[in-house]
Structure formats: C-alpha cells, structure tokens
Image (cartoon, helix red, strand yellow):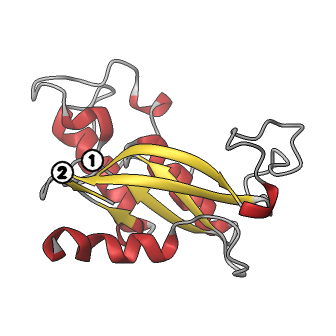
Amino acid sequence: CLRCLLPFLYCYWLIPLVGQGMDAKKIGIVGAGISGLIACKYVREKGFIPIVFEMKDMIGGVWLRTLDYTLLQTPKIAFQFSDFPWPSSVTSDHPTHGEVLEYIQSYARQFQLLQYIQFNSQVVGVEFVKDSCSSKDGVLPSMSDDAWSGEPFSSGGTWQITVHNVLHGCSQ
C-alpha cells in the first residue's frame, strides 16, 4: 500500500548501504538507545550518514521498558556520556527513571541526532547481496571471499536491510 511505502521511500534511497559509488557512505544502526545514539553521533562525526532504525516511537532503549519507580543502579558518574555531563538539576547519585530518560533525550537533542532516526521501524533482516558478477551460488561471502573483503563497504555487493513499519504492519 502507498501509505506503507511512503515512510520507506526515504529509507530505500539510503539503503543499500554500500556499492552505490557515493562519496558519503550510509551506516545503518539498530536501536535508538544509549549505544545507538552514541554510534549515530560518532558515525556522523566521521563523515558517514547514520540511519537509526528505532522500533518504538521515541528514544531511550531499555529505559522505555523499565518501571517508573526504577532508579539508576550505578552512580550517575559511571552512567554518563563522556561529552555530556548530567544536568545540575539531577542531584541524586542514582537518578530516577524519568531523569535518565530526560538525560538520554537531552543528549539526542544537544547533538541533533533525532533527524537521523526512523521511528516505528523494526529491523527484521540484514543481508549481504553480492553483485551478479561476483556471485558464487548465492552463498554469503566469508572474510576470505573476493566478493566481500570483510570490510563494511565492499565493492562486491550491497548490504540490504529489511525494515518492518510497526504502525502500518508492512515491511520494505
């Protein structure tokens, strides 16, 4: 359906992630939790174009699924982005669920990461597809295979990501 296809048109012009001869390579990142946000920030800083696929409609990772009365188990200093300190308004060494979520969301806003996130997008498959001239019986290339050098931007094929739109129930 067109309603399902429109949100993914943007995605499909960016994915395949390799083999398109473009200057800026695209990097797919699964999840907009803490690790996904850090990966997005650093991938962008290295000159790549990040695309973060987040299954939920907001960022936060596991903190979206914790109970509201949950406190951070480790001292906040050990749970801090190296380039983004906790706000002075968070005075407890063990911030609340809401404070942790706000901290994570503030990080994404501070470094303008939200524009790279495709919400309601569940990754259901990742596949390396060889170019037709380098195919060996459709077998996924190994680290020693000529089609895939073990490098993420191999010239022997493309990475294709299948994404399921959780709102519309369709995959692209």
**Can residue 60 be seen in the rendering of this structure?**
yes
- Mark 1 surroundings: few (<14), some (14-19) or many (≥20) residues within 10 A: many
Q: Height in image: 124 above or below 18?
A: above
The answer to whether residue 133 is left or right of residue 1 is: right
Report helix, strand or loop for mark 2: loop
The answer to whether residue 134 is left or right of residue 98 is: right
Q: Which quadrant of the figure contains the C terminus?
A: bottom left
Q: Quadrant of residue 159?
A: bottom right
Q: Which residue is mark 1?
A: 55
The answer to whether residue 136 is left or right of residue 159 is: right
- The amino acid at mark 1 is Met
Mark toward the start of the polypeptide (2 vs 1) = 1
Q: Which of label 2 and label 1 is nearer to you?
A: 2
**Can residue 81 be seen in the rendering of this structure?**
no
Q: Residue furthest top?
A: 73
Q: What percent of the width, then of the height, locates residue 103?
A: 31, 48
Report helix, strand or loop for mark 1: loop
The residue positioned 22% from the left and 41% from the top of the image is 99
Q: What percent of the width, then of the height, locates residue 49?
A: 57, 71
Q: Nearer the viewer, residue 23 or 116?
A: 23
The residue positioned 67% from the left and 77% from the top of the image is 24
Residue 166 image label = 2
Q: What percent of the width, then of the height, locates residue 89?
A: 25, 48
Q: How far apart are the two marked residues, 2 and 1, measured between alpha carbons?
A: 7 Å
The residue positioned 56% from the left and 66% from the top of the image is 16
The answer to the question of whether label 2 and label 1 lie on touching residues, with beta carbons closer than 8 A, is: yes
- The amino acid at mark 2 is Val
